Image (cartoon, rainbow, N blue to C red):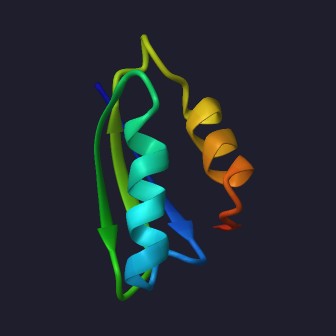
Amino acid sequence: MAEMTIKVEEAVKEQPINYLEKVLIQLNGMERALVDIETGEVKIEYNEHKVSKERIMKSIKENGFRLID
């Protein structure tokens, strides 16, 4: 299992967080996603043999979310 933490600009409000969680759950290999509503940080655990970090990030962007560097 692999882990990564990213910041998502819109992940500070309940509605976008709910949608983001739905997007992530649909990915095969996703284990868990925890969102810190105060900072917009998303901690993700995933099976790197089923889904890549790049695929997760691409899916987030394709669904209208902006990643913060």
Q: Is residue 31 left or right of residue 47?
A: left
**Residue 13 occupies which quadrant of the picture?**
bottom left
Q: Residue furthest top?
A: 49
Q: Where is residue 15 drawn, in percent x and y?
A: 43, 77
Residue at image location 71% in from the left, 61% down from the top = 64
Residue at image location 49% in from the left, 21% down from the top = 51
Q: Where is residue 34 drawn, in percent x and y?
A: 28, 59
**Residue 32 occupies which quadrant of the picture?**
top left
Q: Name the quarter where the N terminus is drawn.
A: top left
Q: Where is residue 65 drawn, in percent x and y?
A: 66, 64
Residue at image location 55% in from the left, 25% down from the top = 52
Residue at image location 46% in from the left, 61% down from the top = 19
Q: Where is residue 62 drawn, in percent x and y?
A: 73, 48
Q: Is residue 31 above or below residue 35?
A: above
Q: Is residue 18 above or below residue 4?
A: below
Q: Is residue 13 above or below residue 52?
A: below
**Residue 55 occupies which quadrant of the picture?**
top right
Q: Name the quarter where the C terminus is drawn.
A: bottom right
Q: Is residue 12 left or right of residue 31?
A: right
Which residue occupies the foreground of this view, 38 or 25? Answer: 25
Q: How many marks?
A: 0
Which residue occupies the foreground of this view, 39 or 10? Answer: 10
